[in-house]
Image (spheres, grey):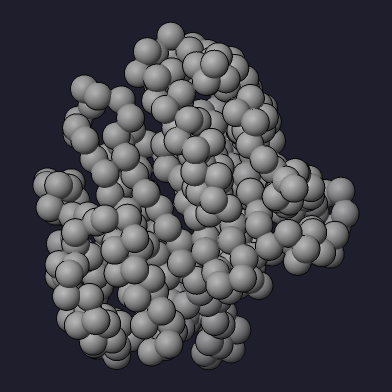
């Protein structure tokens, strides 16, 4: 029986890249059945709720989500629905692989995986204004939360991921020199967990130096693990190593549910023009297929996508081509055959 998936097309370029992804999944005969649901700005417009109950009910049933990007208003307005979904289903591990597809770029043969803690850190959303001298918004404070439990399970996930995927090394990127309690706890726990994986090399590095080294010599890394906000920032940097946000997929993994999405956002600057690159969501769908043990379909889609991107004549604008989002997807389906 086909595996049920809650499909959230999302905002901005979301519906365009989701449509292209579906063309590819259906072209590859992925054994999936889609329950399309609203979330984000579009849900707010249509149902006056950025995370409607019908969407949550569907996710509750399928425990598997494929999601386009969702717009989050900056400053005021509703809080991130992405963060809300990750918290609701305790999707604690955000797995972000980056891999060179097009040879001849600034970096060759990049193959790295960033594992980002997804439920704690500064993104727990514990923040408030502090009124002083009659000004109710004179200052603002955000709280970074690191629990021993949260740090241990994400570092353990990173080591187990490395072992499962035949990878050799895990790097913890942190800021324990300045944030002695929160980041210090993360580092202390990581050192303990590393003892359980003598077959995997391990190192810890300060986050800012890690950012520089990723640009100077990315080949020294393999699997990287870090807290929520650091992972958010460095995964965009790592996407830059392989051609940009258009190429970066992500899986949000929990014990009982998982959600797959592109690293990029809703790109309002190019929405509605049919020119977005759907690669990141297509690669996220490949991660989903592997998660539900449809490895062969994922491998076929990746190989067809690689062929189309390398051949170049059906690429979208960000890849130097002139094809539309749909034309790129159709070319992948042709390459599958
Ligand atoms: P963005 O990722 O949407 O865009 C950054 C730049 O990259 C833009 O110039 C955009 O045109 C380009 N870009 C992104 N994806 C592309 C693609 N597939 N093909 C071609 N070009 C692409 O980041 P932003 O502008 O900072 O954020 C826009 C909105 O998206 C915000 O509301 C933000 O909160 C939201 N967001 C959502 C997610 C998510 O749903 N997981 C992630 C990040 C940002």
Image vertical order of residue 139 relative to residue 239, above or below: below
Q: Which residue is depicted at the point 79% across and 47% down?
A: 35
Residue extending farthest to the top is 313
Is 281 placed above or below 223 here?
A: above
Examine the rendered structure and indicate whether residue 181 appears above or below residue 257: below
The quadrant holding residue 49 is bottom right
Place of residue 142 in the rendered image (x, y in percent of width and height, measured from the top left) = 47, 80
Q: Residue at x 50, y 30 (%)?
A: 301
Q: What is the count of numbered marks?
A: 0
Q: Position of residue 114 (x, y in %)?
A: 33, 57
Tell me the residue at 43%/18% (across/down): 308
Choose top left, top right, bottom left or bottom right for residue 160. Answer: bottom left
Specify whether 219 is left or right of 189: left
**For the view shown, which residue lies furthest in the right direction?**
47
Q: Position of residue 90 (x, y in %)?
A: 58, 74
Q: Quadrant where the C terminus lies? A: top right
Give left or right: position of 115 versus 170.
right
Residue 25: in sight, yes or no?
yes
Query: Looking at this view, is 334 or 181 the one in front?
Result: 334
Residue at 43% across, 9% down: 313
User: Does 221 sit above or below residue 14?
Assistant: below
Mark yes or no: residue 52 visible: no
């Amino acid at each position: 029986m086909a595996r049920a998936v809650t499909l959230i097309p999302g905002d901005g370029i979301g519906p365009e890249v989701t449509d292209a992804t579906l063309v590819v999944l259906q072209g590859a005969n992925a054994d999936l059945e889609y329950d399309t649901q609203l979330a984000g700005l579009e849900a707010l417009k249509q149902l006056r709720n950025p995370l409607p109950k019908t969407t949550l009910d569907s996710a509750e049933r399928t425990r598997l989500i494929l999601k386009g990007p969702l717009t989050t208003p900056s400053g005021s307005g509703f809080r991130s629905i992405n963060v809300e979904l990750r918290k609701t289903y305790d999707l604690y591990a955000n797995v972000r692989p980056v891999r060179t597809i097009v040879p001849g770029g600034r970096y060759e043969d990049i193959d790295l995986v960033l594992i980002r803690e997804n439920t704690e850190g500064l993104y727990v959303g514990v923040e408030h204004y502090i009124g002083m001298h009659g000004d109710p918004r004179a200052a603002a404070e955000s709280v970074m939360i690191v629990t021993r439990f949260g740090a241990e399970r994400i570092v353990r996930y990173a080591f187990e991921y490395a072992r499962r995927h035949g990878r050799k090394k895990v790097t913890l990127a942190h800021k324990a020199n300045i944030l002695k309690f929160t980041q210090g706890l993360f580092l202390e726990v990581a050192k303990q967990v590393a003892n359980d994986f003598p077959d995997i090399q391990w190192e810890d590095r300060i986050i800012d130096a890690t950012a520089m080294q990723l640009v100077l010599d990315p080949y020294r890394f393999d699997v990287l693990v870090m807290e929520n906000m650091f992972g958010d920032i460095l995964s965009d940097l790592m996407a830059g190593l392989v051609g940009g946000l258009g190429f970066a997929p992500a899986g949000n993994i929990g014990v009982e549910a998982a959600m797959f999405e592109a690293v990029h956002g809703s790109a309002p600057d190019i929405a509605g023009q049919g020119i977005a690159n759907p690669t990141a969501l297509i690669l996220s769908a490949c991660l989903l297929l592997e998660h539900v043990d449809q490895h062969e379909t994922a491998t076929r889609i990746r190989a067809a996508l690689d062929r189309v991107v390398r051949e170049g004549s059906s690429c979208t604008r960000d890849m130097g081509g002139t094809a539309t989002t749909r034309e790129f997807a159709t070319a992948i389906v042709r390459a599958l055959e």
